[in-house]
Image (cartoon, helix red, strand yellow):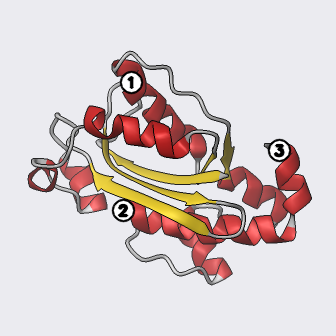
Amino acid sequence: MFAIIDIETTGGNARQGKITEIAIFIHDGLKVIREFSTLINPQIPIPPFIQKLTGITDDMVEDAPKFYEVAKEIVQITQGATIIAHNSKFDYSYIKEEFKSLGYKYERKHLCTVVLSRKYIPYRPSYSLGKLCKDLGIELKGRHRAKGDAAATVQLFEMILKENPTEIAQLI
């Protein structure tokens, strides 16, 4: 099982920033079998630059659940799954830090589609999600929004997995 994840944040780093949106697609190796997506109230102001980049405003997250209100569901749906994310260090570090602030040690195996793409789809001019998707013909709706970026990462991961199933299995 794979949990293909994308988050949006208030910026900065995981120790100072907070998650503002999360999307998780649970994938069984063949297809997506479950989706979870929500805005999250970070309980701190979202900087104007980040609001412009993501389109997520303080008003939008005002009535959204706080991380602790969705934490149990995140634990449950990712249980036994390998986290897949584009630049997984970023996403995974924020998720771990949010759980740490709740006194919970969140640990999952994780793979990065940037690393996988460089290995299995070599010689591309860029490995940023937007440019890689354009180069590979992957539709990317809702750039810099968790659900849109996660959906594109699902397609990218499926491409890599389809051509390299044995190698990916060995990485898990």
Label annotation for residue 54: none
Mark 3: few, some, or many residues within 10 Å (few <14, many ≥20)?
few
Of the two numbered discs 1 and 2 on the same chain, state the one appearing first in sequence.
1
Q: Is residue 72 above or below residue 152?
A: above
Disc 1, SS:
loop
Q: How far apart are marks 1 and 2 (CA)?
A: 21 Å
Rendered residue at 57%/71% (across/down): 131
Q: Which picture quadrant has residue 120?
A: bottom right
Q: Amino acid under label 1?
A: Arg
Mark 2 and 3 residues: CB-CB less than 8 Å, in contact? no
Q: Amino acid under label 3?
A: Leu
Location of mark 3 (residue): 171
Spot occupied by residue 129 in the image (x, y as percentages of width and height) = 56, 64
Rendered residue at 44%/34% (across/down): 94
Location of mark 1 (residue): 15
Q: How far apart are marks 1 and 3 (CA)?
A: 28 Å
Q: In this view, does 99 lie to the left or right of 87?
A: left
Q: Distance between the residues labelled 2 and 3?
A: 28 Å
Spot occupied by residue 71 in the image (x, y as percentages of width and height) = 36, 35
Visible residue check, residue 134: yes
Q: In this view, does 133 lie to the left or right of 94?
A: right
Of the two numbered discs 1 and 3 on the same chain, state the one appearing first in sequence.
1
Of the two numbered discs 2 and 3 on the same chain, state the one appearing first in sequence.
2
Visible residue check, residue 125: no
Q: Is residue 97 above or below residue 157?
A: above
Spot occupied by residue 60 in the image (x, y as percentages of width and height) = 14, 56
Q: Amino acid under label 2?
A: Arg
Q: Is residue 172 above or below residue 31?
A: above
Which of pointers 1 and 3 indicates the residue nearer the eye? 3
Disc 2, SS:
loop
Q: Is residue 152 left or right of residue 110?
A: left
